[in-house]
Image: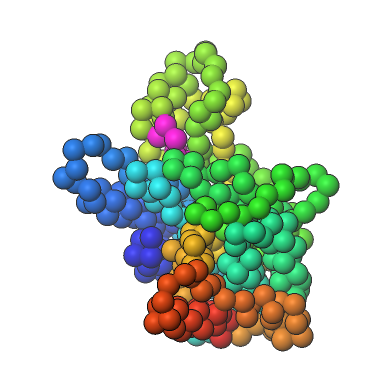
Amino acid sequence: MFEALQLVLSECKPKAKIVDICEKGDSYIREQTGNMYKNVKKKIERGVAFPTCLSVNNTVCHFSPLASDETVLEEGDILKIDMGCHIDGFIAVVAHTHMLQQGPVTGRAADVIAAANTAAEVALRLVKPGKKNQDVTKAIQEVAAAYDCKIVEGVLSHQLKQFVIDGNKVVLSVSNPETRVDDAEFEENEVYAIDIVTSTGDGKPKLLDEKQTTIYKRAVDKSYHLKMKASRFIYSDICQNFPIMPFSARALEEKRARLGLVECVNHELLQPYPVLHEKPGDFVAHIKFTVLLMPNGSDRITSHGLQELQPTKTVDDHPEIKAWLSLPVKSKKKGGGKKKKGKQVEKVEGEAKPEPMET
């Protein structure tokens, strides 16, 4: 995932078309995963687990336009890259925020990126066996408030299972009476996609145009006899090529897709991933990583370093946040000889430093 994200970042230049960058990200994942396990007898599913999205400025998420879209990047844009891959249904996802400019990021743009990054660092240390999902929800909201930002509502961090990108155990970003999830406790050997989106706005994004939605996932538990021929053609194509993972409508025949997808969504055969927006002028940042809850601590397997940030706020006056950040990511492994323990302690000390916070 790191190399795929690096490739997408290298393509992000002023006047570059967003659709071209998204397509290059997806193509790279398909190519690289296709090169793995070529010689095994059993057919192994692999490829894109979540289509490459490039959401700009006040656009929150899921912008992955069709081939006909002419939207380009501009100097000074704040970019959110979101993508995922899988091999044999085992999924890794990542999201990263980058400002399209030379030199350090300053002002409110730096605040919102620092808020997302710090919240992600805190979440990494709290998503541990024995901890509860509501502990994480409360903590990331406190971090965002320290930077005078909001955690964006409606974003869920999901447990990942084989061929399941949205498992039943979830972490809610913002607790409110309208959105409720079941209380859950993290357990050893689980995998999570921790998803943090921060905003300088009110954190209540809106759907402005349904036509911008291009990412869908088949609802495997639903069935309906479609009336339109275009719908049946498109749905058959989806069932054959994208039976489980989210996909982009770019991969479908565009004219038929426009007609057929509407009926599929209306009858809940497909779950749409809408493109949401904060108000113009608001900055939005997105950090997502995949974490494995291993016996000796958490393994973050997807991440990327940030640009130099010069935020206007810090967490220096927030002892609780500083205490969370000082928690080790790794822990001493139970059992084993003295020599092994000594090595493990050394590793713990290195892991405990929240390096991204230095930016």
Q: Is the stretch drawn in magenta largely helix, strand or loop?
A: loop
Q: Is residue 233 visible?
A: yes
Q: What residue is drawn where x is 58% and y is 49%?
A: 158
Kindly give the residue lying farthest to the left in the view shown: 39
- Is residue 307 visible to the viewer in this orientation of the structure? no
Q: How many marks?
A: 0
Q: Position of residue 113 (x, y in %)?
A: 60, 72
Asked which quadrant contains residue 264, the reply is top right
- Which residue is most to the right? 177
Question: How is the rendered protein coloured?
Answer: rainbow
Residue name at image x 38 percent, y 38 percent: 251
Image x and y of residue 96, in percent? 50, 65
Is 244 contained in the magenta span? yes
**Left or right, residue 198 beside residue 226:** right
Above or below 174: residue 139: below
Q: State the image coordinates of residue 34 (x, y, percent, origin top left).
A: 25, 48
Residue extent of the magenta highlight: 242-249
User: Above or below — where is 269 with respect to 43?
Assistant: above
Q: Above or below — where is 244 with respect to 2? A: above
Q: Residue at x 80, y 44 (%)?
A: 178
Percent from the top left, x then y, of residue 98? 51, 70
Q: Residue at x 72, y 86 (%)?
A: 316
Give the camera-side residue of 230 and 165.
165
- Position of the N terminus, as image quadrant, is bottom left
Q: Nearer the viewer, residue 182 or 50?
A: 182
Say whether residue 117 is left or right of residue 37.
Answer: right
Quadrant location, the C terminus = bottom right
